[in-house]
Image: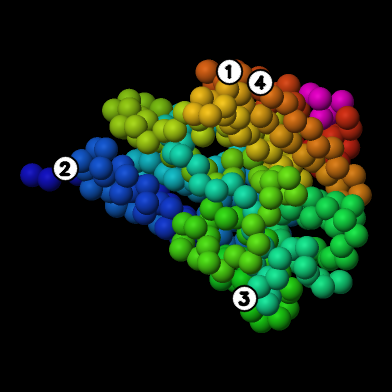
Amino acid sequence: MTEKALRLGTRRSKLAMAQSGQVADAVSQVTGRPVELVEITTYGDVSREQLAQIGGTGVFVAALREALLRGEVDFAVHSLKDLPTAQPDGLVLAAVPEREDPRDVIVARDALKFTDLPRGARIGTGAPRRMAQLNAYARTHGLDIETVPIRGNVDTRIGYVRGGELDAVVLAAAGLNRIGRIDEVTDFLSVDTVLPAPGQGALAIECPAHDAELIAALGELDDPFTRAAVTAERSLLAALEAGCSAPVGALADLLADGQIVKEMRLRGVVGTTDGSTLVQLSTTGPVPETHEAALALGRELATEMLAQGAAGLMGEREH
C-alpha cells in the first residue's frame, strides 16, 4: 500500500506554484511519500489595493497558516519575505532551504540598463523599499527617474513595459529564476545600489509544531547559512518594528577567506520613498552559531539605525 500523500498548502500564483512544486519534489525525496499541492487563495491575492495600504505584513500568509492550524494541509511554503516576523503559536519554521539570488533586477524596454534609462523614465515597483533606494541613487548620481506604484503578478508587471506604459519594472531575481524567465532581465541591480527585502530569495517551509516526525523530515532541507542570514535580516526588521511593506532593505552575507567562512556581514537600509533621506549601516561579526546569536546581530544593527534616525523614516509604525 502506498503511503498517504503529504498535503502542501500553496498560494495559486504561477510563482508560488513553481516554488511549491520544487519543494514538493525535494520533500518527496527525503520522505519517500508523494506530495500533493493544495491551492489556497489569500487576501493578498484577491485584493486590488496597493500592498502598503492593505498592511503588507502577512496578507499572503494568513490563509495558509489558518489551513495549517485547522489541519487542512500538512505543511506550507511561503516566500520568506512575505512572512511576518512574529512566529505564531502552534506552527514552526521547519526548514529554510538554500537561498536563491537575493538581488533585485530591472526589466526595461530596449534592453536598457538602469543607469541608461532616459530622462524622466518611469519605473514601476510596488515596494516602498525599492522606491526609496532607487530614488536615493538617482539623486546622488544625477539620474532623472519617476517611480510608479504598481501591483500584479510577473506577467502583469512586465506587461506594463511591453505595452509602453512604463520604461522599466523592478522585480526579484529569485522569482524570475523559479519560473524560468530570468532571460528577460535587462539589468541586475547590485546590492550596493538596492538592498533586497529581508529574506528575499529564500523560502520558508512551515508546519504544525506537534508533528515531530514531519519537522525532522523537512529539517533535512534546511540550509544553516541561509537560516542564519535571514534570521539576522528579519531580526533587524522586527527590531525596527517595521512590516513587510516598510521601506527597509537588509542583507546578511558570508565573508569567506578562501574556502573558510570567517564572518557574517549584515547591511540594513531604511529611507523615505522619495529617496531624500536614507539611513544605511552595516555590521560584521562571527557567523552566528545559534538562533539567538543571529537575532542579536539584527537587533544590534537596528539599535544603531534607530540612533541615526531610522524610526522617523518608517511611515506608520506597527504595534
* Residue 48 appears in the picture as rendered: no
Q: In this picture, which residue range is highlighted in magenta?
A: 303-307
The disc, 1 or 3, on the residue closer to the chain's N-terminal end is: 3
Residue 305 in the magenta stretch? The answer is yes
Number of residues whose C-alpha sits closer than 10 Å to that of mark 1, classed few (under 14), some (14–19) or many (20 or more)? few
Q: Do residues under tags 1 and 3 come within 8 Å of each other at their CB atoms?
A: no
Q: Disc 1 and disc 3: Cα gap in Å?
A: 44 Å
Position in image of residue 184 (x %, y %): 56, 69
Residue placed most toward the observer, 83 or 29: 29
Q: Amino acid at mark 3?
A: Gly
Mark 2 or 4, closer to the camera:
4
Q: Amino acid at mark 1?
A: Glu
Residue 210 position (above or below residue 188): above
Mark 1 or 4, closer to the camera:
4
The disc, 1 or 4, on the residue closer to the chain's N-terminal end is: 4
Q: Disc 2 and disc 4: Cα gap in Å?
A: 46 Å
Residue placed most toward the observer, 306 or 102: 102
Number of residues whose C-alpha sits closer than 10 Å to that of mark 4, classed few (under 14), some (14–19) or many (20 or more)? some
Residue for badge 1: 292
Residue placed most toward the observer, 160 or 264: 264
Q: Disc 1 and disc 4: Cα gap in Å?
A: 14 Å
Residue for badge 2: 3
Q: Disc 3 and disc 2: Cα gap in Å?
A: 43 Å
Residue for badge 4: 285
Q: Residue furthest left?
A: 1
SS at mark 4 in the image: strand
Mark 3 or 4, closer to the camera:
4
Position in image of residue 142 (x %, y %): 90, 60
